[in-house]
Amino acid sequence: MSKEVHVLVQKLVDGDISPQEFDFLQDQMEADPSVRELYYDYVSLEQGLQFRLARKAQQSGLAGLAELRLRQQRKLMLKVATISSLAAAVLIAIGLSLFFIEPEGEGLQYASSPGTQFKLVHPEDAGEIPNGQMVVGSRMEVSQGVVEFQLDTGVRAVISGPADISLLSKNRLFMKSGSGWFDVPEKAHGFTVQTSEFEVVDLGTKFGIIADLAAEDQVHVFQGKVRVHALQGKKQQRELTEGNALRVYPAGDLEATGPESDYFLTQLPTELPHLHFTFEHADDLLGVESLTSQKEFSYQYQGDQADFESGRFGNALRLNGINNYLETNWPGILGDQPRTVAFWIKMPKKRISKEEKHISDTIVGWGMQRDQNEFEMNFNSKWTIHLDYSSYRRPSLNVSFGAFWYYVPDAELDDNQWHHVAVTYSGLVTEDGKPFVRVYVDGAEMRLKVKADRETVRDSAGNVAVRTLEKTPLVVGATLSSDPMQDTIQGQYLGALIDELYIIQGEIDEATVHSLMEKNRISTPPSVVGEDGQ
């Protein structure tokens, strides 16, 4: 690729490109399949952004999901239009060593927490690179888990996935997505982190950055100060000092926000971030809360007073099927991020009459339940593990994304015995474009069938589009409601015993499923490097 093209790309990033130059650059993109592929990949990702539904929006009242979509889309379209116009420029900069990337220089070393999965791609001309190292031009895509970087300059960073990071120079990172905490020593002053929306230049600090393709990027300063420069629109600049935080909007405006250290990890965890409800007693149902990007996790038991019985490990929570369930303030694992839900369940025989309207119960769920109309019903914006009832067969165990869901034909759960259930979703798709899901019952992987009585939204590659959206937070034993003013459907509650519920930010393997079932703890499998890694 010629130097002229490099210069034009840089001018596009800076917003200084003329119409004639832009036309020329477009021609180059059309002529280069690799650039075109990168561009379309980025645009496709942006067009699949999740809608953002804040809890305050529900409280203020909405006319319906259609109005909510319009409000959110107006906000997202500005960001999509702005970022898509320079998507190719950003990705060319990462993948093809744009002129401002040093062709040679020092690199970094990395380590990852147990259960982390990532793909590492090095420049073609980098030669043989030792394991555990990145060089200028290397790119790491973290699908789950946490990675720690140690640059030769002394900078230490802890990045929580999902994340996409590239080393542009020995003192500069590009973070397309992810949440990162940075500790910069005095000798590395000037260290820079660039996102799609701003660049942050260290002036002697500890700081955190959130790069979110579905919302505004943020910077939080915990010590010292940084210089923040918006890369789009007004391109506002500001120095930010200890105890302050900013978010940047697509128009280039910088707005103060509250600093939150809880959004960032400062050390590698020993396990994948997760929730673990032990259900030992009414005063403390929760055993572990190690979630990332969650300010203050809380939960509330709704309905009659919590009732406990002997469970698989210690006590278990009894849900009466009449008026009680567990509700949290956590929005759940969103988008197409990998996830695991595991629990013990014990329930009596359950059959319903043909006239019964209460035909299903959610065991665990979160996200946006869609209306059952032609416009709404084809989206995959929720995540539920639920039971469908019948008058002539045992309850059917289902894993639903919304319009698309699997059911488990061979699972028998209503025999009044304890059964362990684990459901994993990798964030990837099968060969025929369906979400890659595994279901284990009592440690055995189960056969899955697709419930395919409706169409579902697919992405540009023809794959089922999974975009779990924020609405109803994590609930246990209650059915999600499509009403924008309600989280759950009144009167539709699960009757069962539940014990040792795990919600894990990542996909676990079969050995870890057995560890949960047999020992009630997450095992520590090694990190997984993608095929492109070295």
Image: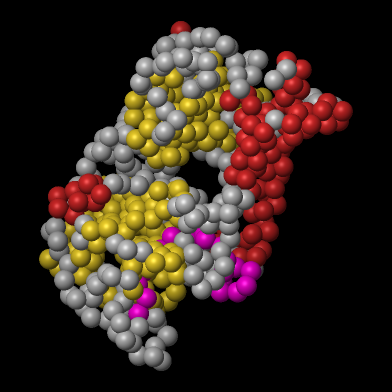
In magenta stretch: residue 387: yes
Q: Is residue 250 above or below residue 450?
A: above
Q: Which residue is at the far right?
A: 20
Give the percent coordinates (x, y) of residue 331: 44, 54
Going 58% across and 57% down the picture, which residue do you hit? 458
Give the percent coordinates (x, y) of residue 205: 47, 19
Q: In this view, does 175 lie above or below 124?
A: below
Q: Which quadrant, please, contains the N terminus?
A: top right
- Viewer-proximal residue, 248 or 365? 365
Q: Look at the magenta stretch and give its main secondary structure.
A: loop
Q: Is residue 199 above or below residue 382?
A: above
Going 62% across and 30% down the picture, which residue do you hit? 91
Quarter of the image for residue 65 reads bottom right
Give the percent coordinates (x, y) of residue 370: 54, 67
Q: Is residue 72 above or below residue 19?
A: below
Left of 218 or right of it: where is 393? left
Q: Which quadrant, please, contains the C terminus?
A: top left
Q: What stretch is highlighted in magenta?
A: 371-389
Q: Can residue 252 be seen in this view?
A: no
- Viewer-proximal residue, 212 or 463? 463
